[in-house]
Image (cartoon, rainbow, N blue to C red):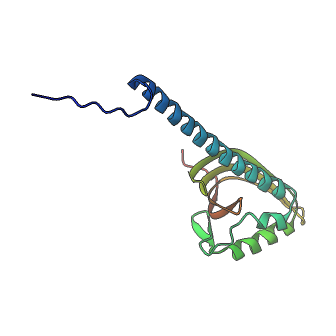
Amino acid sequence: MIQTISIKLFPFNMNLSTISLTAIMIISQAVHAQQKAEANLIKEINKQLDSFSSYMNNLNSEELKKFYAKDPNFYWIEDGRVEYPNREALVSSLSGLVNSMSKTSFSIKDRKVTLLSDTSAMLYVGYDQSMTLKSDITFSINGAMTILLKKEEEQWYFLIGHSSTKKQRGN
């Protein structure tokens, strides 16, 4: 003979559909909260990138230096080679470049942020930049950057970067 054992899980009367609906609502709220947090992080990164662009256009090398992580793992690649093996080398070069210009126009043409965690992200930036040196030589470049960002003390920093200029490809 088979006996049925009944266990009351809740002190009140709830059927399975009510429990399922409650679980779906809780999960939905958690997913929405996560999406909102991710959107806020992306907004922070885009704001940081816009600030970088503004400081570049204003030739503010002191503010530009602050974007690069003070981290022993920092390096930057340009056109296929490690051009700056550490932050100090990049900051020195950046200061020299900015101080040699009389004006510049840096414009972001495309961007894509991919969050890796709450404190790291990948950033793609397509850009155009025209520069006028103090010697009145003017030139323009267009290119792309990919940047690994890390967040420390509520600030996003460039940790590892790559920049390259667009090149003509064969027909």
129 sits to left or right of 157: right
Quick one: which residue is furthest to the left in this view?
1
Give the percent coordinates (x, y) of residue 51.
79, 53
Give the percent coordinates (x, y) of residue 31.
54, 38
Residue located 90% across and 65% down the image: 134
In this view of the protein, which residue sits in the foreground, 122 or 58? 122
Quadrant placement of the C terminus: top right
Q: Would you place residue 133 above or below residue 4 in this image?
A: below
144 sits to left or right of 31: right
Give the percent coordinates (x, y) of residue 8.
35, 32
Residue located 71% across and 76% down the image: 88
Residue located 79% across and 57% down the image: 139
In this view of the protein, which residue sits in the foreground, 160 or 117? 117
Quadrant placement of the N terminus: top left
Quarter of the image for residue 74 reads bottom right
In this view of the protein, which residue sits in the foreground, 29 or 116? 29
Quarter of the image for residue 92 reads bottom right
Quarter of the image for residue 163 reads bottom right
In this view of the protein, which residue sits in the foreground, 14 or 120? 14
